[in-house]
Amino acid sequence: MRIQPGRLAADWRKRVALAFNPVARFWAWPAGASDSPVKVTLRGDGARLEHTVGGQHDEGWWRQAAVFELESGIVERLIVDDGVDCDGRLTRHRSSYCTIDRLRAACNPYRPDVPFPAWTDAESGQRDYSAEAMGY
């Protein structure tokens, strides 16, 4: 077997580039969508993707934001739901994370043909503005 000149050096450069500039590719449901997942690609530490959707409805408004960020081989995800209806304003948030090696480790029952990240829950919470105003 003959090795092509420069091939080993090219492979080495590629491995070094991946070690210092990780790439995370995974499937995710876009904010506010329920029909099709999308492929997300984050290149290099500090890479960040934000997606926000929202609109009006008969009782007020709604907004959902999703933020994905790659840092040190870990993808962090933050989902924020915010809106106003007849009961007042309510904001919910939840964050989770997934290591690069687990980005294809979970199965979604709605799309068993698509590998999803195995997210680990980090924290969640909500703020009910009406309840705060009433002293709860």
Image: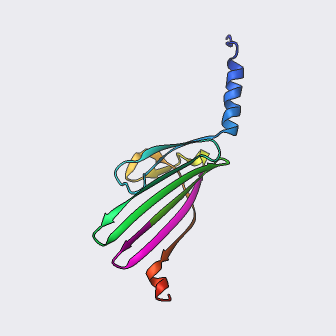
Q: Is residue 7 above or below residue 112?
A: above
Magenta stretch: dominant secondary structure = strand
Q: Residue at image x 68%, y 33%? A: 17
Q: Is residue 17 left or right of residue 92?
A: right
Segment colored magenta: 82-98
Residue extending farthest to the top is 2
Residue extending farthest to the left is: 58
Residue 85 vertical position relative to residue 98 in the rendered view, above or below:
below
In magenta stretch: residue 90: yes
Say if the magenta span includes residue 85.
yes
Residue 10 vertical placement versus 109 (above, below): above
From the viewer's perspective, tell me whether residue 4 is left or right of residue 29: right
> 47 or 125, which lies in front?
47
- Residue at the limit of the structure toward the bottom, as seen here: 135
Q: Is residue 14 left or right of residue 129?
A: right
Residue 1: x %, y % from top left: 67, 11
- Residue at 50% across / 89% down in the picture? 135
